[in-house]
Image: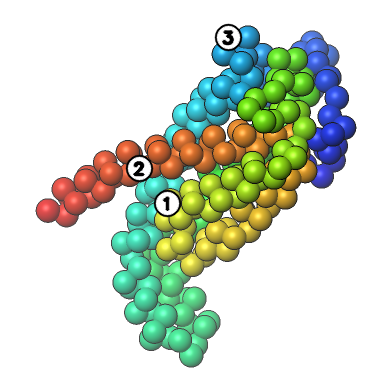
Amino acid sequence: MAGCSPASQVQYKPIDPDKAGFWQKYFVYPLAYTLDEVSKSIGAGLAILVVTVGIRLILLPLTLKQMKSSKAMQAIQPEMTKLREKYKNNQQKMQEETMKLFQKHNVNPLAGCLPIIVQMPILIAFYQALSSSGEVHGASFLWLHLSASDPYYILPILAAVTTFLQSMVMGMGDNPQARAFLFIMPIMIFVLAFNFPAALALYWVYGNLFTMIQYYFIGDKFKAKREGAAG
């Protein structure tokens, strides 16, 4: 997103799908069109919520994969703790034995990061869609001007905090290989939300909250299934 303009310079630029390139035609334009159509019925602020939920439902298979990976990492934590204690003076040997442990249990320690990584191109498409959505561009929601950054920094803080909480809820804190994302992602999201349109930060906050609620309900089913299998 380095080539994007600051929020205060975002201009309305409708997309002509007949002349647009592949990215604009098949990713940005459908998103902008959906935002426009939904905004006409319920307003721009709630339209972002509806579109966010739709995107997160599309990403549900990745979310389930992340949940499965988190559960698997939690299950082998006792063995990982023993390895860290046994080879605390030999980092190379500890890493080798840890990788063997992952292979033995068919665990990919970075699988839990996949949904967050996939979110980045979606975030870029959403940003570009804002300048192409006549209903969202220039609209207001609560105290926010959706095409400008939040002047009170409330949304950037909420975006960072909910990103951290989502990572904790998804179990990334239990994964040493993914633990850096606990702090890197919230900082990166805060910087983006600080400099870019409030609509973008609102999308991210909505998405984080929805994912945590989704994990609460689906996660219980995963837990019950695992305990039933163990019994």
Mark 3, secondary structure of its residue: helix
x and y, in percent, of residue 20 in the image: 80, 18
Q: Quarter of the image holding residue 38? A: top right
Q: Which residue is mark 1?
A: 169
Of badges 3 and 1, nearer the viewer stands: 3
Of badges 2 and 3, nearer the viewer stands: 3
Mark 2, secondary structure of its residue: helix
- Please, is residue 77 above or below residue 58 in the view? below
Tell me the amino acid under the disc marked 3: Ser
How far is disc 1 from disc 2 in space, using C-alphas?
A: 8 Å
The answer, for residue 199, to whether it is visible in the render is no
- Please, is residue 133 above or below residue 4 in the view? above
The label on residue 41 is 3
Residue at point 64%, 41% (across, down)? 155
Tell me the amino acid under the disc marked 2: Tyr
Q: Which residue is mark 2?
A: 216
Marks 2 and 3, the one that precedes in the sequence: 3
Q: How is the image coloured?
A: rainbow
Residue at point 53%, 53% (across, down)? 164
Q: Are marks 1 and 2 in contact (CB under 8 Å)?
A: yes
Decide: few, some or many residues near mark 3? Use Cα within 10 Å; few <14, some 14-19, many ≥20. few
Q: Would residue 214 be found to the left or right of residue 1 on screen?
A: left
x and y, in percent, of residue 200 in the image: 67, 34
